[in-house]
Image: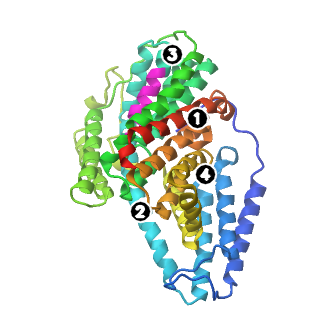
Amino acid sequence: MSGGTAAGPPVFNWKGTLVLNRTLAALLAVFALCLPGLAWATSGDMERLDLTQHWVGYAALAIFAVAYVLVMAEEFTLLRKSKPVILAAGIIWAMIAVVYVNNGMTHEAEAAVRHNLLEYAELMLFLLVAMTYINSMEERQVFDALRSWLIRKGFSFRQLFWLTGILAFFISPVADNLTTALLMCAVVLAVGGDNTRFVSAACINIVVAANAGGAFSPFGDITTLMVWQKGMVEFWGFFALFLPSVVNFVVPAAIMHFAIPNKRPTASDERVPMKRGARRIIGLFLLTIATAVSFHNFLHLPPVIGMLTGLSYLQFFGYYLKKTTRIDDNIGNNGRMGEVVPFDVFNKVARAEWDTLLFFYGVVLCVGGLGFIGYLGLASELMYAQWGATAANIAVGVLSAIVDNIPVMFAVLTMQPEMSTGQWLLVTLTAGVGGSLLSIGSAAGVALMGQARGKYTFFGHLKWTPVIAHGYVASIAVHLWFNAELF
């Protein structure tokens, strides 16, 4: 989905490193097959072994670290991020299983894996439905129509800076922050042209706004979705983060405003009409969200059941579009032929971000494995018992700027520390907006570095990190003050 006409990424000799990493992983798996039985480090009910000081535990940490280095180096290696974490997950659980089998515990590891798979399946199917709707709206040219409308209006650079940021903030709670950021970046690139100063600042603003907007909605980010589906915060409870999210976006935007050129770009008269059924698909998406919320709040069923029910709405509407498609329907307002292939919902399913969905599988299984070994218990003891919940949750946000917020949040949910609703909202906020501190800290930032290659860069974003940090600190302060009754 990313674009750019600049030269390709720097040459990086990754093949030798990847072969070495895979060789080491294979050797670790072979060594695991020869592990002797353990006669120590069992829990009181003899159902779980403590492997935190066993070499299998150290090997699992090393394998996950190597896999995640490859994930962060995706831009240079061109190795899809799902591949290393899926391999790491398999190796980690294979080593764990061998230890348990050698100790006569043949079902404990299996039960733990099945628990992690159930959590993954719920989130994966939920995201798959949301991605299918987003792809359907994209195919019906909903986002292209919005982009062309913005370009035609002839706004100034400063007006576009604020408008794209505000739209990113309010679209990301419904759509995901990645899609929202890509849409707004397309507008910025179309009007910004060679004005690197404007494009860079506007892209930073979009990343901050999209991440902030996604933090106060269960649908805005994978981390908020995880917290909601886990039952830590009720659906309407997330909206308590609206004001802190606004502060997180507005504070750095207000400072960056003065760095935007006070000029007016050349307007364009391009018009992109939406295809037949576009508005009805938007309505069906909103109805699907309402169905998921109702299933969870009133029927006490997993939200994914409501989302899959909502997918059937789109399937039946797609059937209607297919049966009622005529040649006349394929002629747009400009008199040219538009869609010549009838709407097919399964094409939209196939176009989902499968690399992201499979990456999520690898992360859930890897982090679940480390938790089963016992490392998350140690981390929980250190962070939440010794540091305190507030300091730990703020640190989670800073960590999410370096490591993707998905494994960080899944680790916190796996630890399940005893926290108030206010603290769960705090970690939701920090994990969501902490990724804005660096361009590599969120999917939106990584995607925009590819889409606006050469104009929006890691170091260009890093220059504004102190300003973004002001928004991060201010949003935490507002949450601690405004939502004090939740603590």
**Magenta residues?**
162-173
Mark 4 → mark 2, Cα distance in angstroms: 21 Å
Look at discs 3 and 1 and give the one toward the viewer: 1
Q: Position of residue 359 (x, y in %)?
A: 54, 56
Mark 3 → mark 4, Cα distance in angstroms: 36 Å
SS category of the residue bearing label 1: helix
Q: Is residue 90 left or right of residue 113?
A: right
Mark 3 residue crowding within 10 angstroms, few (<14) / some (14–19) / many (20+):
some
Q: Position of residue 366 (x, y in %)?
A: 57, 64
Q: Which of 119 and 335 lies nearest the eye of the viewer?
A: 119
User: Residue 469 bears which disc, if any?
Assistant: 1
Mark 4 residue crowding within 10 angstroms, few (<14) / some (14–19) / many (20+):
some
Q: Which of 56 and 308 lies nearest the eye of the viewer?
A: 56
Residue at numbered disc 3 = 158
Look at discs 3 and 4 and give the one toward the viewer: 3
SS category of the residue bearing label 4: loop
The numbered mark, 4 or 2, whose residue comes first in the sequence reads 4
SS category of the residue bearing label 3: helix
Residue at numbered disc 2 = 121
The numbered mark, 1 or 2, whose residue comes first in the sequence reads 2
Identify residue type, mark 1.
Answer: Ala
Instruction: Say which residue appears at 44% left-offset and 42% top-offset.
Output: 480
Examine the image and state in which quarter residue 133 appears: top left
Examine the image and state in which quarter residue 195 appears: top right
Magenta span contains residue 165:
yes
Q: Is residue 430 above or below residue 88?
A: above
Q: Is residue 170 above or below residue 79?
A: above
Residue at numbered disc 4 = 80
Mark 1 residue crowding within 10 angstroms, few (<14) / some (14–19) / many (20+):
many
Q: Is residue 253 above or below residue 309?
A: above
